[in-house]
Image: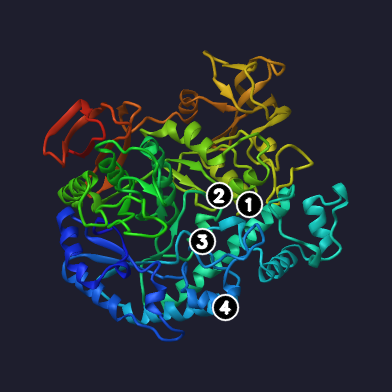
Amino acid sequence: MDKVYLGAAYYPELWDEDELEKDIARCKEVGVNCLRIGEFAWGKMEPEEGKFDLSWLVRIVDRLYENGIFTVLCTPTATPPRWMLNKYPEMRMIMHDLVRADVSSRCHVCKTSTVAREKNRGIVTELAKTFAGHKGVVGWQLDNELFPYSDGCYCENCKRAFRAYLKEKFGTTENLNKAWGMARWSLCYDSFNEVEPPYPRQWRHPSLRKAWRDFQCAQIKSYAEEQLQILHNYGCENVGTNMMQHNSLSYYKLNEKLDVAQYNHYDTAERLPDTAFAYDFVRSIKNKPFRIMETQVGWNGSEYAESGYRPAGNCYANTWLPVAKGAEMNLYWLFRAHPNGHEIGHGALYSAAGRSYRVSEEVKRASEDFKKCEEFLTGTCIQSKIALHYSSTAYNDLECAPLLKNFNYRETLMQKYYAAYRHHNVDVIDTQHGLEGYEVIVSPFLATADENGFKERITEWVKAGGTWIVGPMSDIMDENVKRYTHAPYSFLEELAGVYTKYQKPLDNDVFRAQWTNDGECGISTCYDAYECNDGTNSLAHYTAGEFAPLSVITERKVGKGKVILVGSVISHGDLLRLVNRAPIAEASANVILTERTGKESGIIAVETENKSGYVILNGSYTDLLTGKAFTGKTQIQPYGVLVLKRKS
């Protein structure tokens, strides 16, 4: 990371070219040094089949660069032109209602279509040939917001490919029937040709739903990597794709060969603290600076504005928080509001008439502040000793078979677990992530744990001295959404040294628990009760409800480390008690802290709830934004930011 990029999405195809100079002046006015261009402009790039015109785009990228404004170029494959979709209707998805998508929106391309793949290769090749090596291009975005829209495409090509996918995975229908338990209700398949996708209007088998999701995600991965390879063949660098807020399409798998992890979010002002969860996740995927490609500058919307009021200062904090968490780029959607069309109600840095908003001043302020501490930001990094698991497999397992009514895996991780670590450096990781360097790993609701060699790796990591805090509802099903039959877990019961006497996936106000040594232990949501084997200690036990006095939290030493098995959702304080690691500093709950180390060291503090906060500093620091010296208890204004460099 050698620079902080701040900017927005820009759609020059909507404007007369003489507007460019005015918009360049506006960029300079607010400190924008990067624009994202081209994601929906295929129609202007290829107005007729096989006849490409990128001259207008070259002029724009050249002119921006001449004015110190860099470009992220997008492949426009989310929106093939109308003439193409009409000539080749098989390119358009069959939606979950079994109606072929009409030509009225975006992201409606079948990822299996051979015609779509061919046309993609054509336009991406032209872009790569034209812009490879251009000094003004600092990165690429593949397509737009890739994930299985409408639960994927239901066309005949996708059905055939799905059946081939299942045949390759299972070999025989006998194996598939056994893995999915199809004997129940006499649902066994005699041929892979009998397999139909899980249509939304029916009561859908969880294993079928999960397999369909996995297949659609595999198609998307192939779709993206085909474009990536073309760009790499021409020497194009910093290629990524802007991903959405869920983990249905595995971030780790899709980004496996990509150069940089990219992320979009449109959280409301009230949810600003939650965005840090995603930043700690996206940063961990590549273990390098990531890029925010879209977030709303004021409000978002379609034909109307929505997402609530954004108080003064919120945009400033929303600009800072990803950079504090390791982002090298923060781009807003969008630079200049659309004068017409589907998203006419969406906010922007500038109105359609080119006039700034109050939030534009906050972006300008952030830009000026980044310059004051750019050396510190680019010369330091984030190192975490604590990791929290956020698994794509578990996400899809618990979407298809949540077991708990109205359960939301991502929300539960954010609110019940991640929120406890606002004053710690934490990596949010998937199961294929390396374990080296962590002292504590927390794995709640890791429904499938026996994947990616994780069982063997976590066991060796614990033996080497790590503390694994695992559960509840972890290691309870395989990748086919099938429960284990030899025990409630695939390996966890043996590793933790317990016998699981009872499991209750029903929240209630009856069950109570307390720590074995002292104090009440807050529990909720679901309840497992354990008998401890020799060598396993009970840390907390039930005191009310039919499970008393069985254990709800157990601990067992394994080699130099230990496994702490947790049978319920516990409070933030109880969770921090188990983690047992000192925070970066003591601070109020509304302040998020990030410790940075490298050539220099320090702390970035961001207030996220629009009220005064504080941090208690152990040592002497200089705030790089104001030049003021601080030590001890330091106040932070609502939506304020402190970039505190430690004095040597």
Residue 451, which numbered label? 1
- Residue 221 location (% of width, % of height): 54, 65
| Foreground label between 4 and 3 | 4
Which residue is painted at 25% across and 71% down in the image? 16
Label located before the other in sequence (2 or 4): 4
User: Residues at badges 2 and 1 in contact (C-beta under 8 Å)?
Assistant: yes
- The three-letter code of the residue at mark 3 reads Leu
Q: CA distance from mark 1 to mark 3?
A: 17 Å
User: Residues at badges 3 and 2 in contact (C-beta under 8 Å)?
Assistant: no
Q: Nearer the viewer, residue 185 or 268?
A: 268
Label located before the other in sequence (4 or 3): 4
Secondary structure, mark 1, is: loop
Which residue position holds label 4?
88
Q: Is residue 67 above or below residue 478?
A: below
Q: CA distance from mark 1 to mark 4?
A: 40 Å
Q: Is residue 65 above or below residue 493?
A: below
Label located before the other in sequence (3 or 2): 3
Which residue position holds label 2?
431
Decide if residue 69 is on the left or right side of residue 278.
Answer: left
- Colouring mode (rainbow / by chain / secondary structure / one colour): rainbow
Secondary structure, mark 4, is: loop
Q: Which quadrant would the C terminus be assigned to in this image?
A: top left
- Residue 318 location (% of width, % of height): 31, 43
> Local crowd at mark 2 within 10 Å, few (<14), some, or many (≥20)?
many
- Residue 207 location (% of width, % of height): 72, 51
- Residue 135 location (% of width, % of height): 24, 73
User: Residues at badges 1 and 3 in contact (C-beta under 8 Å)?
Assistant: no
